[in-house]
Amino acid sequence: MNKKVMAVVEIASNELRFKIGERKGEGFKITEALSYPLSLGKDVFHFGKISFESMCRSADIINGFLKVGEDYGVDKVTTIATTAVREATNRDYILDQIRIKTGLEINAADDNQEKNYINTLMMGLMPKKHTKSALAVHLGSGNISISLLEDSRITFTRIIKIGGLRLSEMFDVVGPEKYFSVVREYLRPLLDSVLKNLPESVNDIILTGQDAALISKFCKGRPNGDYDEIDSRDFSAFYKQIRDKSPTQLRDRLGITTETQELLLPALVIYNRFLKYSKTEKIIALPITAGDCLLLKLLNPGRYSELKRQLEESSVTSAFKIAEKYELDTEHIKQVEKCALLMFDKLRRLHGLDKRKRLLLRLAVILHNVGRFINPKFHYLHSYNIITGLDIAGISDEEKQVIAAVALFHGSLLPSASHPVYNNLSPSNRAVVSKLCAILRLAVAINSGYGSKYDKVTMKLKGNEFIITLETYKDIELEKIIFGTKNELFADVYGIKAVLEKRSVI
C-alpha cells in the first residue's frame, strides 16, 4: 500500500510555510519544509488590514508551494492562518481572493485554537518526565502563550496579546542600547500577572514555535529526539552577548536577516524572564507550530484523537482550578456535574450532540457560578463576563462563548433571539446553548438543597416524559419546588415533560 503524503500551508504573520509529511510509527515525519518571508503582520499592525498586493503575493507563493506538492505526490493539502489574517479587518475579502486564486479554503484559527494545536502535539512529543512540572511558552507574532503543566496536564493557561512582531517595532524607536531594558520594563507587569498564578518554580521550561530552533542554534542546543536541550548558562551567555548590539552588528555577528532579528530579540527578552523564574538548568526547545499538529491530524488521526482526549482532561482540570480560585464548592459542583452528564447521556437521541458538546456542558457546570465571587446578585451576568475573559486549556474562543452563554442563561433568563448574547451566536450554537441550558437548569434544581440529599439518581425516557428519580430518605420538597420553576425551558427545547420523583429508602 502506498504511503499517504499530506501537506499543510501556514500563513503566519512574517512568513508563509509549506510542510509535506508522511506517517511514521505513532507520529509523522516531515519530508520537505519550505518557507517564504512575507510580513503580513506589518500590514495589519500598521494599517489594520492586508493590502491586495500582499494578498496577490501570498497567492503566488502558495501556488508555488502547491506545484512542489504535486512533484511529491501530495494527496491532500490543509491550511491554517494565524494572527495577521485573523486580525485583519478585510480578512473575509482576503481569504476569498486567496481561495479563488489557489483553490484552497484557508482556516483562520483564533488564538486559542492555535495554542491548542501546539499544546496537543507538545503533549504527544514530550516525555512525561518533562511534563510533570513545566512551563510551556510560545511566542507568536501577535501574542505570547503560556501554559503550566502539572502531572502531565495543563492546569493553567494564559494568552498575552503582545507578540514578537509588535515588540520588535520598539527596536526602531528606542535603538539597540535601550531596547532590552525598555522591553523588559514594558513586559514586567504583563508577565508578573501570569507568574503570580504559578507555583514558586517549575522543573522545566519548554519553548515552542519557529524561534525555538533559532535559539537552540545560537545557544549550542543538543538534539534529543524530537527536541533540543539548551544549557541555561549557554542561553544566558548568548543573551548578554547580543543585548546591546545594533542591527548591523547582529547581522555581521550572527548572519541573520532583519526578519529573523524581529523574531529573535523579543523572544530572548521573554524567555530570559521565564528562565529566571524557573531556575532550571536547561531549556527544552521544541520547534513546532500549529501546522505540525495539522499534519499529525491528517496522517495519524487515531493518535491525534488520543492526544486531543488528553487535552480535554486538561480542560476539566484547569476549569476546576479556576473554580477553586473563585472559592466555589467543588464537591457540590461534582454532584451537579454527575447529574448533568447522566442527563446528557440519557437524552442523546433527542439532542443529537457529540462528545465535544458533552465536554462543554461539563465545563459550564464547573464554571456557571464563578460570578458569585463578585456578587450573588446577578451572578449569572458576572459569570458570563468572567468566563469570556478566561483562557481555558483546550477550548477555542467560539467554544468559550458557548460555555459563557450557558452560564448566563442557566438561571431565569431565557435564551432567545431578543438577547444580544444569544443573537450573536451562530445558529447552530444557539441550539447547542439552549439544549445545554435546559439540562443544566434541571441538574442545578435537583441539587438545590443543602448537601447531598440522595444516595442514587436514575433517569429514563418514558413516552413523553423524562423521569428523574431520587433514591433518598430525606425530604426533597425544596428540590421539587425549584425543579418546577426550571422545567419550562426543558419542555420547550426537547418537547417532553421532565418529572422529578422520590423513591424512599431505609
Image (spheres, helix red, strand yellow):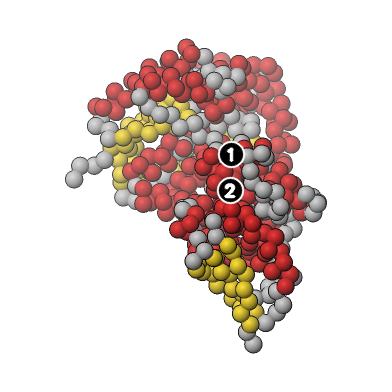
**Residue at coordinates 57% horizontally, 43% vertically from top-left?**
430
* Residue at the farthest bottom position: 506
In the image, residue 469 lies at what x, y percent? Answer: 59, 73
The amino acid on which the numbered mark 1 sits, given as a three-letter code, is: Leu
**Residue at coordinates 42% horizontally, 54% vertically from top-left?**
306
Label 2 element class: helix
Left or right of 380 on screen, residue 227: left
Badge 2 vs badge 1, beta-carbon distance below 8 Å: yes
Which callout, 2 or 1, points at the residue further toward the start of the chain? 1
Residue 447, label in figure: none
In the image, residue 418 lies at what x, y percent? Answer: 66, 39
> Which of 355/240 is in front?
355
* Residue at the farthest top position: 53
In the image, residue 70 lies at what x, y percent? Answer: 26, 27
The amino acid on which the numbered mark 2 sits, given as a three-letter code, is: Val
Task: Judge whether 91 appears above or below 148 on screen.
Answer: above
Q: Is residue 314 visible?
A: no
> Which of 145/211 is in front?
145
Quarter containing the N terminus: top left
> Which of 457/386 is in front?
457
Q: Identify the residue position indicated by label 1 in the image.
A: 425
In the image, residue 225 lies at what x, y percent? Answer: 40, 46
Task: Judge whether 320 appears above or below 125 on screen.
Answer: below
**Residue 31 sits in quarter:** top left
Q: How many labels does the image show?
A: 2
Give neighbour class at mark 2: few <14, some 14-19, many 20+ (Cα, 10 Å).
Answer: many
Q: Identify the residue position indicated by label 2 in the image.
A: 433
